[in-house]
Image: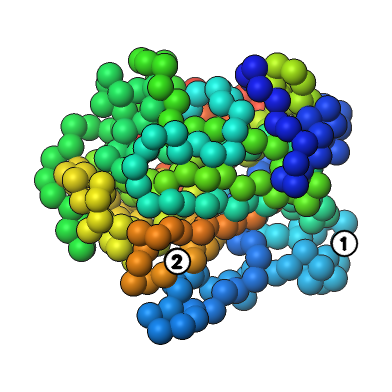
Amino acid sequence: MTDSQVPPTDAQGPTASEVPEAGGQLARRTVLVAGGVAVTAVGVGGVLSANASAQEATPATAAATSTSTEDTCYTLTSELVEGPYYIDADKIRRDVTEDQPGIPLTLDLKVIDADTCRPLRNAAVDIWHCNATGVYSGYEAGGGGGPAPTGTPTGTPTGGPPPGGGGGHQEPTDDDRFLRGTWHTDRHGQVTFKTVFPGWYQGRCVHIHVKVHVAGEWTDAGYEGGHTCHTGQLFFDEKSVIATSVLEPYVSNTATRTTLTEDGIYPQNGHEGGLLYLKYDRRHIGRGVRARLTLGVAPDETNDGTGGGGPGGPGPSASASPSATTG
């Protein structure tokens, strides 16, 4: 995992030369969990956001209720497949938008040790997703995201579940890398990406892929060593997706859209399964969306996202079989 750029010293995190706190050769497992505090709708028309559930506890609260060192601070959630369109840490950056049109999206992620609730600093976080018309960069020659587009999206679309199994990683067909990037967490375990609200392609609901790497080192060449401690996907509620679908360039996407409940990879368990907390103006979603979630890492098992898919995701394994479902 290399690149000519090194994350600079800024308010986002420590210097590039610092080594992640989680040292040594760690096995790993990671889970997506709800993070932060509930946000209430405000104003006329208001701001739409997902409220924190009762299961979402702050680290302090969770630690206080833990009865033993074996207990975890956060509820572990499903690991999900990598999909066929991952490109290893090709761009070290926080703003992955490039020239892609779409609704501005600010993605706030926090990485913590699920057992201790301590933030993981200097972890390398990858995100990648398709553009508004369903195309993944690096794969445009092959369609870049599922079967050829058919049908017309509606307010209550029915795209059917994606095909299960098969697929695996595909080699890139071109050098484009829009809507992809890797950046380090700061001393609070936080990282923020600037991107656009994803579109969709036939067979999958709207989603963002994410990986977290720990125990490596930032060098002049980028991020080196360590291992992947989490592979997951982040999801958007139907209200937000429907709101975007009537705006350009999303309205030009003619692919049949699969809803969140129809998707065969989203485990249908809310924020534990990667459902993002969203905040935006209901009347003017085009002005921008802010999304957030906490990624709780348990660094004692391996999960690289290649061990199968569907609800529940692949089981943590040091030697997962090389198969994956659609992106």
Name the residue rendered at 70%, 37% in the picture: 184
Can residue 244 be spotted in the picture?
A: yes
Q: In this view, does 135 lie above or below 159?
A: above
Helix, strand or loop at label 2? It is: strand
Taking the view exactly as shown, the residue that stands out farthest to the left is 151
User: What percent of the width, then of the height, locates residue 239?
Assistant: 34, 66
Report which quarter residue 16 is drawn in: top right
* Residue located beneath label 2 in the image: 280
**Where, quadrant-wise, is the N terminus in this rendering?**
top right
* Residue pointed to by mark 1: 68
Q: How far apart are marks 2 and 1 (CA)?
A: 39 Å
Q: Residue at x 28, y 61 (%)?
A: 242
Q: Position of residue 56 (x, y in %)?
A: 64, 68
- Front-most of residues 225 and 263: 225
Disc assigned to residue 36: none
Amino acid of disc 2: Tyr
Q: Position of residue 247 (x, y in %)?
A: 25, 56
Q: Does residue 84 appear in the picture of this structure?
A: no
